Amino acid sequence: MFEITKDTVIAEILTAAPETAPLFVSIGMHCLGCAMSSGETLGEACEVHGVDAGEFLEQLNARLASKK
């Protein structure tokens, strides 16, 4: 199973779990295909966008768990 942490790169998340894309968009991360997503970690992106990384991480992992 793919596990998402604050250190996971956004592009890796979207490749392994494309169903999480709407969650990113819902918090204002609209540029999912931009160059930054290929090197920016979830924690870094959350900091830039003013999002609580722990809460967002819970949402992402809940989405993955519901996929089982």
Image: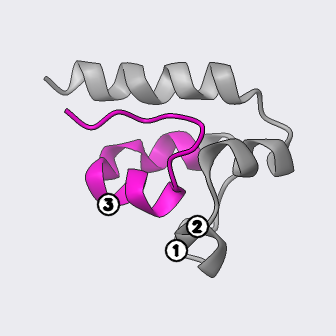
Left/right of residue 57 with respect to residue 67 in the rendered view? right
Q: Nearer the viewer, residue 54 or 50?
A: 54
Q: Residue 30: within the magenta?
A: no
Badge 1: residue crowd in 10 Å (few <14, some 14–19, many ≥20): few
Q: Amino acid at mark 2?
A: Ser
Q: Quadrant of the N terminus?
A: top left
Nearer mark to the viewer, of 3 and 1? 3
Distance CA(mark 3)–CA(mark 2): 11 Å
Left/right of residue 34 with respect to residue 46 in the rendered view? left
Q: Tell me the chief SS of the magenta region.
A: helix
Q: Amino acid at mark 1?
A: Gly
Distance CA(mark 2)–CA(mark 1): 6 Å
Q: Amino acid at mark 3?
A: Thr
**Mark 3 — residue?**
15
Residue in the image at 30% along x and 47% along y = 17
**Mark 2 — residue?**
37
Which x, y percent locates residue 28? 72, 49
Going from N to C along the chain, the mark reached first, 3 or 2, is 3
Left/right of residue 58 with respect to residue 44 in the rendered view? left
Which x, y percent locates residue 30? 64, 61
Going from N to C along the chain, the mark reached first, 3 or 1, is 3
Q: Is residue 48 above or below residue 60?
A: below
Q: Nearer the viewer, residue 7 or 23?
A: 7
The magenta-colored residue range is 1-25
Q: How many tags in the picture?
A: 3
Which x, y percent locates residue 50? 86, 39
